[in-house]
Image: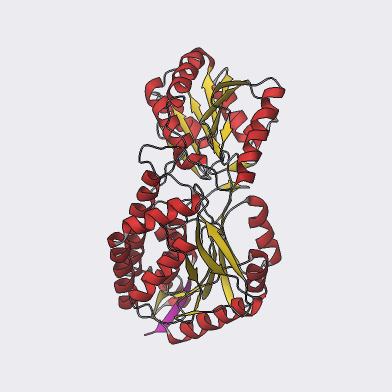
Amino acid sequence: MITKTFQKLYIGGEWVSARGDGAEAVHDRWTGDELADVAIATAEDAHSAVDAAVQAFGSGLPVHKRVKILHAVAALVATSSEAFALSISRETGKPITAARTEVDRAVGTLTYAAEEAARLPGETVPIDATSSGESMIAFTIPEARGVVAAITPFNFPLNLVIHKVGPALAAGCPVVLKPSDKAPIVAGMLVQAFHDAGLPAGWLNLVTGPPELIVAEWQRDDRVKVLTFTGSARIGWALKSASPRKLHILELGSNAAMYVDKDADIDRAVADSVAGGYSNSGQACVSLQRIFVHKTVADDFSFKLAATVKELPAGDPTLPETVVGPLITAQAADRVSTWIAQAVAEGATVLAGGTEMNGVIAPTVMTAVQSDSPLLCEEVFGPVVTIVHVESAEEAIERINESVYGLNTSIYTSDLAAAFSFSRRIQSGTVLVNIPPSFRADHMPYGGVKESGQGREGVKYAVAEMLLEKLVIIRA
């Protein structure tokens, strides 16, 4: 029996009621049970959150306190790991095993943030390298840019929140947070952990409700210096165009690709394709979507992949063996089903899956898909992988680079020269060799090119984005 709760806004170190009377119900994605009512903020509430953040920024937060608090929150999340995992699974339909993995990663991300807070960058500058700089000493001081507005998605509702909040606090930037309206409860649990860890008032503020109202308020407010967003390309670039003077860190969409060369380890490529394409039900911007396979090994690869995918457990996300659960909404499942049916009508073949029941898309493998199909051109965000036969690595590179996206891309080969050539020529933020494109370590630089965004996450790199370098020059 789930006890329904009410989640308020968190502004200025306190849980407060929204100025309006509205609330939005959040339901268990699998059972439909009502989990909580969540406050719907007004524009005035969003403005008040910035007021609190600005006041906190003016008071400052010493580095040693940032380090202590971030370590303390990591410990609190670790202690309550199962509660966090259950919340993630209930809100989003993420299989419980994947939810537990997300919590483990989140603890690591918080720890990285604490470590980076303790080693903020600064350097001496050899100003006397020019004659005019004789008898002078110069050095840089890292300074926080100011208030950070963080807008986060549903698919990793804990770890992706931490990827924005953790680096911001490590850099000394207070945060106003707008989590996905599809997964606000776990964000509230994290905010409570920061409260319990002793984070001073105003340094983290949680505002839930309509994004078009809340984010628009933050866009207009010149006191918000950084806007960090993970989500669709359409929304991300619209945010930037509406507030061009702010620094934007945009982690946007993709249709991640892999090339399997003629000399690849086929069994490894198949196993990694399963992990890369179906984990989290394909709902990740680096989920494997397009597999280009050299024609000489395409039949073998396709047979083995389809046979493996047909055996993947799908359905109830509370079962530890489940790999593919329901998509985040019924509308999302309908969209993916429509794309599959459209591809079949145009001549595509379904090698595995292709069906939908109760919001669960059966793990799907497609082939003979038209090059202009949404399954190849758009971001599917579901458990669907398409195999494309190619004549050569040259053709694979050309086809992969045709995409408007460029986030993570993989090649499977035993030829080191081929791997280097592929890495140089692919238009992608990250190239992985014999590793699926879904791979992400939370401390690595992470981000895309083209429509996949701008700026870099990964704790150290996100901290750098949120800092300014002040140069100090002293005449001896």
The answer to whether residue 266 is above or below residue 68 is above
Q: Is residue 167 left or right of residue 451?
A: left
- Where residue 115 appears, as percent x and y from the top left, is 31, 64
Q: Position of residue 257 (x, y in %)?
A: 53, 34
Q: Is residue 106 rendered to the left or right of residue 447?
A: left
- Above or below residue 276? Residue 49 is below
* Observer able to see residue 371: no
In the rendered image of this protein, does residue 288 appear above or below residue 169? Answer: above
Residue at point 51% right, 39% down?
282
Indicate left or right for 147 with 458 as reference: right
The one nearer the camera, 167 or 142, is: 167
Q: Nearer the viewer, residue 447 or 476?
A: 447
Regarding residue 322, the answer to whether it shows in the image is yes
Which residues are the magenta region?
Answer: 468-476
Which residue sits at x=46%, y=26%?
309
Horizontal relation, residue 229 to residue 470: left or right: right
User: Residue 116 falls in which quadrant of the image?
Assistant: bottom left
Give the image location of residue 195, x and y in percent: 38, 75
> In the rendered image, which quarter contains the N terminus?
bottom left
Q: Nearer the viewer, residue 244 or 80?
A: 80
Q: Main secondary structure of the magenta part?
A: strand
